[in-house]
Amino acid sequence: MRIVERLLYGIGGLLALILLFIMLCHFKPELAEKIGETLKANAKEMEEISEETTVPDIETSPRNQIDTFDAVTASDGMVVLPITREEYEAPTEDQLTVPSWAQEKSDLASVEAQGAAVTEQEARTAFDTLGIGNTGKDLSFDAVMYPYYHMLDATGKAIYRQIYANANSLVKEFAPVEAISAKLLENAFTAVVNDHPELFWVNTAYKYQYAPTGQVASIYLSFNRTADNIEEAKQLFEESADNILQGADEQGTDYEKEVYVHDRLISRISYSKAATMNQSAYSALVGGKTVCAGYARAFQYLMQKLGIPCYYCTGFAGENHAWNIIKLSDGYYNVDTTWDDTNPNTYIYFNCSDADYAKDHIRRGLSVKLPPCNGERYRGLEKEEEKEDEEKKEVTTNKEENKQTSTSTEETTQVVVAPRTLEQAGFTYEDLLKTIDDYYTDCSMYLVGSNNNTVTFQNVVASEKLWKEIVKSYEKGDYESAYMNRILVEKHLNSAKATVTGEALADGSYLITHTITLQ
């Protein structure tokens, strides 16, 4: 009886204390607020401690879902892109009329995934031995700048962050941080390489192992040779990009910056299927030779550095092809720097709508989810100016032709000067340069060996055909990527101006005189 009595007294006392506390908080709310903040801070501290020490739930661990995973019903990771609710309307392939010259400038290599089946036990062993590497769980990516990331659901984003983080850390092999199917892995990997042209050492190919249920058990990234000396490669990559961007910030609007970069980029690179690492921005910016993928990734990266949203877009244009979508103040536009790189360079495929591109470009894969291009303010502006310039040029040319016709009858005599011999020019047969690569090497030797900012030198090439090829290289700017950019990097300079003249010699060779000003 006394025990019950004491218990009742105890409960009564506790209720009295609770009532007193409630009344105190009522009359002094600042006390309640302070107590609440203290409790909240303690709870947060306990949560952080829990996060640091908690082992992943055994039931939800990807390793322990291998036998119950269902690849047929598994998510592919795709969601609606948050930056637009509009959809791209793709034309049909039978509507395409791709120019024959353009089909030869479409050499995109699709993402290549090689899967290998393993047993359930081998899959679990892969999780145990490889580990997950870097998860990148604290990374975030802006929706407007990196749209492919935001095409993915929560699981897809987790895999994207993991691939991105491990690629940056040069970790090639790891187990997925969440249970995924092969299709989700492909979408996440494609999203990473499409969003991040700066990952130039990552090839557009990977391998993976999968369990009998279809769950991916391991991921193997593929790196190109630049990964062997990554810091030096990154330095060359950034220096080459900065060289093209020099002066871009002085342009007023995003559109003016876009035109500036478009022109400088295509004047410095040339199309070559034989270029090494030609699916990367590195091949374009450092090597100077690339294919459509390199053009598009280089343009994307340069615009990203200027803070202008620019996307890597893939599809079909007679062959697999890559181009860009850029966001300006009034909307989105298509840009194909590869097809604009002609002789002379043009703006035919610059800032075009989807309707403009419907005759020769079709988006495919994840690029279908990129925003439609319906901008109008900056559509075709450069083509209009280009047309006006051509009309003025034609009028001027006609005037000059008329003038020449009217004065030609006054010319009654002509002085013929015999061309000099190779020996008279101060060279011998052994000095003749027989290929354009030999010519570039010879020019490099003169520039490397001089400490002057203005360098004048001569060399001789074996034929008129080679001379014309050299002239074309200076007109298109190919010489910059062939030898000049490397000289600028080695001498820590920013720009070069080249004046080159040729003299036909008696034996058909050409004497070339150079004046190179380095700044």
Image (spheres, rainbow, N blue to C red):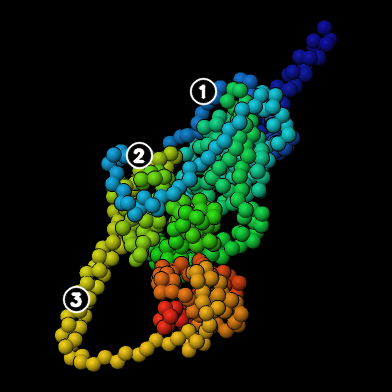
Q: Of 81 and 110, which appears nearest the observer?
A: 110
Disc 1 target residue: 72
Kindly identify the amino acid type of the residue bearing the numbered disc 1. Val
Q: Which mark is residue 189?
A: none
**Marks 2 & 1, CB-CB < 8 Å contact:** no
Q: Secondary structure at mark 1?
A: loop
Q: Residue at the spot x=40%, y=65% of the render?
A: 263
Image spot of residue 193 (x, y percent): 53, 46
Q: Residue at the spot x=44%, y=78% of the render?
A: 509
Number of residues whose C-alpha sits closer than 10 Å to that of mark 1, classed few (under 14), some (14–19) or many (20 or more)? few
Disc 2 target residue: 87
Visible in this render: residue 500?
Answer: no
Q: Residue at the spot x=36%, y=46% of the render?
A: 317
Visible in this render: residue 415?
Answer: yes
Q: Is residue 76 left or right of residue 360?
A: right
Q: Of circles 2 and 1, which is in front?
A: 1
Image spot of residue 456 (x, y percent): 51, 84
First along the sequence among labels 2 and 1: 1
Q: Of 391 and 48, which appears nearest the observer?
A: 391
Q: Secondary structure at mark 2?
A: loop
For this orientation, the residue located farthest to the right is: 2
Kindly identify the amino acid type of the residue bearing the numbered disc 2. Glu
Number of residues whose C-alpha sits closer than 10 Å to that of mark 3, classed few (under 14), some (14–19) or many (20 or more)? few
C-alpha gap between disc 2 and disc 3: 49 Å
Kindly identify the amino acid type of the residue bearing the numbered disc 3. Asn
C-alpha gap between disc 3 and disc 1: 70 Å
First along the sequence among labels 3 and 1: 1
Q: Of 428 and 182, which appears nearest the observer?
A: 428
Locate residue 4: give its quadrant.
Answer: top right
Q: Residue at the spot x=61%, y=72% of the render?
A: 490
